[in-house]
Structure formats: C-alpha cells, structure tokens
Image: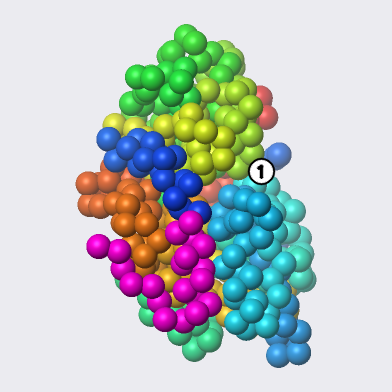
Amino acid sequence: MVRSLPEDPLIRSLVINARRAQLTRRGALAGGVAGAAALALAACTPTSGSAKPTAAADVSSTDKSMIWANWPAYMDTDDATGAHPTLDAFTKKTGIKVDYREDVDDNNSYYAKVKDQLALGKDIGADTVCLTDWMVSRWIRFGYTQKLDHAKIPNIKNLNPELLNIDYDKGRNFSLPWQGGFAGICWNKEEFPKGFTSVGEMLKEPKLKGRVGVLSEMRDTVGLIMLEQGVDISSAITDTQFQSALDVLKTNIDNGVIRNVKGNSYLDDLTNGDTLAAICWSGDITLINGENGDKWTFAIPDAGGTLWNDNFLIPVGARHKANAEAVMNWYYDPEIAAQVAAYVNYITPVEGAKEAAVAIDPALADNQLIFPDAATLKKAHVFHTLSPAQEQSFGSAFQSVLLGA
C-alpha cells in the first residue's frame, strides 16, 4: 500500500517530484539491489604540544548563507537543471542560502588541502563537511571541529540509536551521520554476465588485466582483501595481517592487473570503459546505472564487505555554525531523508525514513542498499579504529604502494 503524502505542502511537492524521478530509476535500482542482496600521505598529527585552535565566532544571525563541502553523487539532483530539490526547499523554508560544493574526492586528499588552516583555526571555505568515520575521528581528536548545539538540531531524535554512541564521538557532540554504505565489488555485466564473488576472482580473471580499479580509501580496499584472507577487520588488526593484504595489492599493481587507484573519480573509469570491474561503493553503482544504462552490478563479496558512515562536522574556523546546524536538522526530517536516499541509494541514518520512502516508491523499502536487513548487515564489517601509531604507519605503507615505492 502506498503511504499517504505528507501534509506540509513544501515537503509534499518534494515527495511528488522524488516519486517521478524514482520511476525513471527503478530499472537501474533492480540491478543494484539484486547484486547487494544475492598524493602523498598528509601529516597525521599536529605539532607536538600545540594548543587546540579556538572556534570562530558565529555570524549566522546576520548572514543567512553557508558552504557545504561533500562528495560527488551524494545529493538529490534534478537531471535536467542540476538543481538540488531538497536544498532549494530548505532555502525556501529557512531563507538560508547553501553553496553546495562537491569538493571531497578522497578523505586524505581533502585533509591535505585544509590541515594547515585547521591547525590555525582558520576558515577552510566550508561551514560543514561530510567525511568518513576514521577521518572525523582524527578531526575531533585534534580539536578541529566545533561542538554541536543539539537544541538547534531537534530532529537529532531521529538518529538511529545504534549510531549515537560510537567510540570516537559518544553522544554525537561533534559529528552527525550523513549517509552510510558498503564497499564491495562491481563489474560490467555485459562483459561478465556470470559476475564475481570475490576480489581475488576478479584479480585472477585474464580478461581483466589492466581493467580493474580499486579505491584510494585504505580501509575499503585493504579491508576487502583482509576479509578474503580470513581476518576479522572489526577487531584489532596486526601489522602482519595488514602487510599480507598490502602485498596482494602491491603485486597486482606491479603486474598491471590493477589499472587505477582512485577516490570518487573511479566512476569516470567505469563509465568510459577504462575499467570493467572495481572495488567500489554501493550507492555509486545504482547512480551510474541510472545515468548510463544498466551496465554494472554491485555485490558484497562472499567473504564480506566494509560498512562505513560519512558524517557532518563543523570545522573549527567555520563562521556559520547555526546555519550548518539548521541544514543538519532539515536532513534529519524523515520525509527529507527519504528523498535523498531514493536518489543516492546509500544507507540513511534517519529513523522513520524507511516508512516515508514508501510514499516515493514502495520498492525502496526493500532496497538493501538503503534499508539493509539483518542478513545483509551480517556480511558487512566496520574497520577497527586504528591507534594513532597504526594510522600513521599503515597509511604511510599504503601510500608508498600507491606511489610505486
């Protein structure tokens, strides 16, 4: 049964538009859901003994604007105009104009660009940024984020309780999940209709020599290899376990099987045919299927995939804190969260979004990439939080492989 449309006329119109858009994406969705169900290393630590920077003064009361830095393909978008319907509705509702920028291609490369300003407490050109758990943990540890005012984010009550008390930010005082997802494998199903069940299977396929892509996110690429080697990546990881997986990566880069190691730009290689299979992120594959034809299949390998969240944070030098908190509150409305989820096909952290999604398309509630059930989640593993020393040593070793050292 289709859920009744919301009473708020602004949100009602958004749901109707999202429903129309979803109808054109349903064919691509089916392929993605079936698969899911069946630069040098930036310095990791500030100068020893350095004081944590002081938060900037908030000018939100007199300046109704803000800048949001996010990853590509991570927001509902009108394909005809390039506009973002839910953001436009936010501006109409609040008067706050959002300059939305797809500035994040990789956690480390983004951090490398802004770390010096962060250490000085300066404005990095963004009032909120969405980064992955481990990088958010680093920013919080170094004092590079501002404490959230939960009173200005009343919809925080809709946060999935399982995401409230994570180890690096208990109570969510400095971060708030934006979207989550899986790292798994994908392939061009026109070229490989039988597909693959593991990273190792892809790397051994003769037709894929020089046509495999992997992610520059260490925890996803190395994590999938370690899972295949029988390592429980959600528990403490030893140097030997990490090095064994890294050796597999290095061997396949050196022998020319792996063509590229990239951040979000790996999608370009899939769409132009440079790569025919890849370690990838779940929602991306549904998106490019919708935009370029139903050519790719995503799957969590039999040995398991990684599970992660990208999170809102407010940089220490941001001058529009309250405006950023207003954006967070907007996207924690279940009706709004459902519309974004219907487009990006990542796991929403917002309770009630699944029920709201039924108004857009009842099939969304069964989409394992957005609302995974227990069986799907059992195949996904969160990469264990590394110590600062491990973060430095593992990261350096990974970057050395990428740089051909």
Residue found farthest to the top: 206
Rendering quarter of residue 282: top left
Quadrant in the picture for residue 170: bottom left
- Colouring of the image: rainbow
- Residue 62 in picture, x, y percent from top left: 76, 89
**What amino acid type should be assigned to the residue bearing mark 1?**
Leu
Span of residues in magenta: 1-20
Q: Which of 179 and 364 is in front in this view?
A: 364
Where's residue 127, x and y in %? 68, 71
- Relative placement, left or right, of 123 versus 389 is right
**Compared with residue 399, is residue 389 higher up or lower down, i.e. above or below?**
below
Q: Quadrant of the C terminus?
A: top right
Q: Is residue 96 left or right of residue 285?
A: right
Residue 328 against residue 27 in the figure, above or below: below
Rate crowding at label 1 as few (under 14), some (14 to 19) or many (20 or more) other CA atoms within 10 Å: some
Give the residue drawn at x 46%, y 67%. Answer: 15
Residue at the image point whose x is 76% and y is 70% from the top: 123
Q: Position of residue 355 (x, y in %)?
A: 31, 67
Viewer can see residue 123: yes
Q: Is residue 243 above or below residue 147?
A: above
**Which residue is situated farthest in the left direction here?**
375
Residue 10 in the image: x percent, y percent? 53, 77
In terms of depth relative to the viewer, which is nearer, 73 or 10?
10
Residue holding disc 1? 41
Q: In which quarter of the image is residue 184?
A: top left
Residue 6 colored magenta? yes
Q: Would you say 405 lies left or right of 165 here? A: right
Camera-side residue of 162 and 331: 331
Tell me what residue is drawn at x 46 percent, y 53 percent: 22
Residue at left 68%, top 83%? 95
- What quarter of the picture does the N terminus occupy? bottom left
